Amino acid sequence: MSNHWIYLNNSDCILIMGSNAAENHPISFKYVTEAMQKGAKLINVDPRFTRTSAKADIYVPLRSGTDIAFLGGMIKYLLDSKLHNETYVANYTNAPFIVKESFDFKDGLFAGYDKKARKYDKSQWDFELDDKGVPKMDRTLQHERCVFNLLKKHYDRYNTKLVSEITGTSEAELAEVYKTYCETGQTGKAGTIMYAMGWTQHTVGVQNIRTMAIIQLLLGNMGVAGGGVNALRGESNVQGSTDQCLLWHILPGYLKIPTASKANLADYIKAATPVSTDPMSANWWQNYPKYAVSLLKAYFGDAAKKDNDFGYSWLPKADDDKVYSWFDIFDAMYNKEIKGLFAWGMNPACSGSNVGKIRKAMTQLDWLVNVNLFDNETGSFWRGPGMNPKEIKTEVFMLPACMFVEKEGSISNSGRWMQWRYQGPKPLGNSRPDGDIIMELGFMLKELYKKGGKFPEPILNLKWDYMTDHVYDPHKVAKEINGYYLADVTDKDQTYKKGTLVPSFAFLKDDGTTSSGNWIYCNSYTEKGNMSARRGQQDAPNNIGLYPEFAWAWPVNRRIIYNRASVDLRGEPWNKEKWVVRWNGEKWEGDVPDGGWPPLQNADGTPNDKSRYPFIMTKHGHAQIYGPGLADGPFPEHYEPLECPVEKNFMNSQRMNPVAPVYGTDADSYATCDPRYPYVATTYRVSEHWQTGLMTRPQPWLMELHPQVFVEMSEELADLRGIKNGERVIVSSARDKLECTAIVTKRFKPFRIGETVVHQVGLPWHFGWRWPDTGAEDSANLLTPPTGDPNTRIPETKAFMVNVAKK
Amino acid sequence: MSKGFFIDTTLCTACRGCQVACKQWHDLPAEHTVNTGSFQNPPDLSFDTYKLVRMTEDVIDGRLHWLFFPEQCRHCIEPPCLESAGEPSAIFKDENTGAVLFTANTADLSADDIIGSCPYNIPRKNDAGILAKCDMCNDRVINGLLPACVKTCPTKGIWTSGTGRMKALAEKHLETAKRNSQSRSSGKDSVRVIYLTGFDPSEYHKSTMAGPGLLWHEHQLIMEHEVPHNLFVKLLFHIRMSMMGSKDAREFLKQDISPFKEIFSYILLLHTKSGKSKLFVCQK
């Protein structure tokens, strides 16, 4: 989240689309409710009428997988009606940047498409640069190839009639949503978006969010109180695990994973560090070398020296152009390329898309270690439905982990707050904290590598001193993540002693004199103490609920990021009542600003060359309405899902995202526009269960509330299929089939898509055969498809095709 | 201090945290349910389920609504169940909190008569004929804690406080609900548990309101009370009223519509068929 849950109450209009906050983030509704009680409008867009819809001022349906069409129509509406914040757009975004003539967009394809490789040559989307290498700009937004005019042209096709035909939302409903939301473009008004997996889990997942980011930038809603683009993370510490590089393509703090072609540290740093020649661009990532070297010092300690590239050669390297995502791991496992698996706090046998393939892939393993609270469908995959234990050679080990309340440590929530938690009850039985398990694993590996083995250096040199009195010490890890001075260092006239904690990332060095396990967390645990354990109750002077001394937010306790865009060119807040930061003539007041530079203009309106553009994390200092770095194009475009109910994309000739990944095993089947699977399906969660249900399905009070996997469908579809409410039915896709209970409801309605009626159904994915002990309930991911987003590889579980039949 | 509940159903998201918190605090067993084609589960209140969020899909004025009604005992000031029982060891009221409490001695009563006497159809019996229902978390309340359902509600849709404050709170919420919603708002005020509903309460469930054949209008609020006929209970009632010693108590004893005139422009006084309860239909 660019903002935080509790700041939602500053909003004038909340759009909940691609999430179901009332059901899946129930506590968020405390703040949504507060905003509504102060007069905010709540808009909900969802294929199905949910518990969120029940509370919304405006609910409109849309067919799963058509969000870009819906939002593209909003971009057209707001540009046609000139509802954008012109100062903001012209000065804080890349709308005035002039794009090279090589850029083109024709019938669904951007310039540079290689059909065979299913890939774009992105260099054709570059900006035109001046002699100094700075992008050419036209702040009047008149140039025909400036981003603003290319944007207008791109979305000119997204008229409400066409959008309505694609989405199934009526033109009147579209108009109502567009009008209500775009009123937040007025100076001093703030609109916000709460989204989750309903947007990300598509072959156009990243571009769904990009479309909304464009809208937020046009309306001037980024950086302001009650605004922002807010990803509601699906688990209390998903933000933290992403920050600490849960995903394969990054190192902690969003540093890039080294690839094989970057043979040494210099090559790696050169490729990863952006260079800007614009003196007005802070280009914060120019500090990349400091963060990378400090990370290597945290990993390898004294063994990391300048003359050995700080141990860079010991880092694992990805093959260039190879992807190692969830899909690819299980694809490799299915193809017998992976022999062992640690499933740690995960239940892939229920959670992954096309889970039948995942379960089969596990039969190819020599060993599997299941680290979890309880046994689950993963640890017991060998005795699951359709498995013959006699034919499965995989040896399975169960390491019981204790629950979060039984251990000390931090979590980082969606709003980027690192919050310290104390231990409650002691771990039950012989279960242990994850930290203890992984520490001991590390010690054992070191012992084994001492005796020999290929390439022992990474393991033997790994700094591994996070125990106190033979137990894992979360404080030691938290301090390592913050970082230490490794020598006496004098910085800005002050001397910092070797062994003390670094005060913030501005002090990190690229010469090996500092360490930091994650630069964005540098400032979280300092000589002043554990910032995340603070529980200060005092609000900041702007009184918008920042509570700066409650826990700690990355970066440097900034509560609302991009906050220098919350003011006009002279540093005056767009909203003087709910201001985030403001310039008092000498310095910024309020939240921790995105850099202390003065506003772009002096009080008399003359430009101030001591200033820097407010979006400091981008190379050119401007927010990116035009995004030339993504796999699927600089502007979002509507494509149909891998499996869809229409033969033809009404928007262009490309039926689906031309760069979406495809997998080729016999377990990766799909069927689009196939009469055997005529209904759109989506998956979701309910309040009463959690993820794959491992913590909720064994809990009788929760099972009582939602005891069985179900499929929701409209009364019209139930009539068509002769299905009665509450009876068991079979849902089938090109992958597999699933028995579930039918919920026939008014909350699903058939869509009119072009000339045809399209029905949609939905299923929760919380179930699995281990619990309840009938074994009759299983995962909806048996049905979900083998593809995902080309940028992230997140699976397309929110839009696919099924059939529904009486049992 | 005498307590009351205020439940603003317009804020309820049916997360059912209250339903689970109730089971947890009372350590009630889960029922072995099946999905009956609805999110509402268990399907009804039971001996083991004191609190139930009723969920109803309805098209009102051409617009689909999903109505949520966290159902529980209303803890009537003049509880018909208590009167029907006439046995303080089985059904009694904690005069400190106002909680109407059932004991295992309800096994000796006619369960069907007790259930039949409840205008809201709340009590449920087990196989042994013992009756059970919401106890207002009386053990928590007398120890200065909030009832479990109130404590757990994320949207602050359930409140508890002294009965005197409930009316004011209901009024405030009604105003907010009207201002921020296109939907109509109406409220119901039995004596200790006041519900604010977005629509005609009969849309939510057939026994959300007491009394037969009442017409519900926009923005209406109903109150109900009666001085007991049973001499013993009447004595208790007067003792409690005198203990209240407040303006509220005098208003209750006056038994006319004047306390409501300050708030409502239209007030209608009705009596239930049994004659045991009075009903005030109030409209702004």
Image: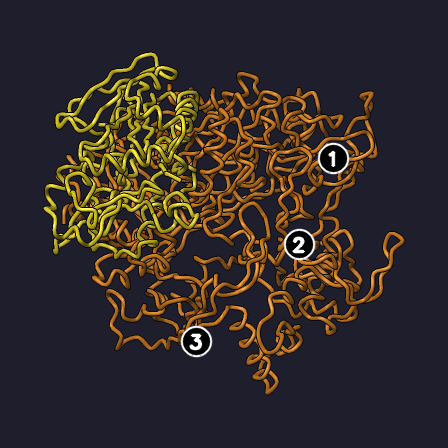
Chain colours: A orange, B yellow
Sequence-wise first label, 3 or 2: 3
> Which residue is depicted at the point 52% across and 26% down?
A12
Q: Is B87 on the left-hand or right-hand side of A472?
A: left
Could one spot residue A495 in this view of the protein?
A: yes
The furthest residue to the bottom: A451
| Mark drawn on residue A430 | 3
- Which mark, by number, is residue A531? 2
Q: Is residue A487 above or below residue B157?
A: below
Q: Answer above or below: position of B114 versus A309.
A: above
Determine the residue positioned at 12% across, 38% down.
Answer: B116
Helix, strand or loop at label 2? It is helix
What amino acid is found at the position of numbered circle 1 in the picture? Glu
For the residue carrying disc 2, how many other residues have a C-alpha within 10 Å: few (<14), some (14-19), or many (20+)?
many
Q: Nearer the viewer, residue A183 or A324?
A: A183
Q: Which residue is mark 1?
A: A589
Task: Kindly identify which chain the residue marked by label 2 belongs to.
Answer: A
Residue at left offset 74%, top offset 35% = A589
**Residue A45, image x and y in percent?**
40, 32
Give the amino acid type for the residue marked by disc 2 in the picture: Met
Q: Which mark is residue A619?
A: none
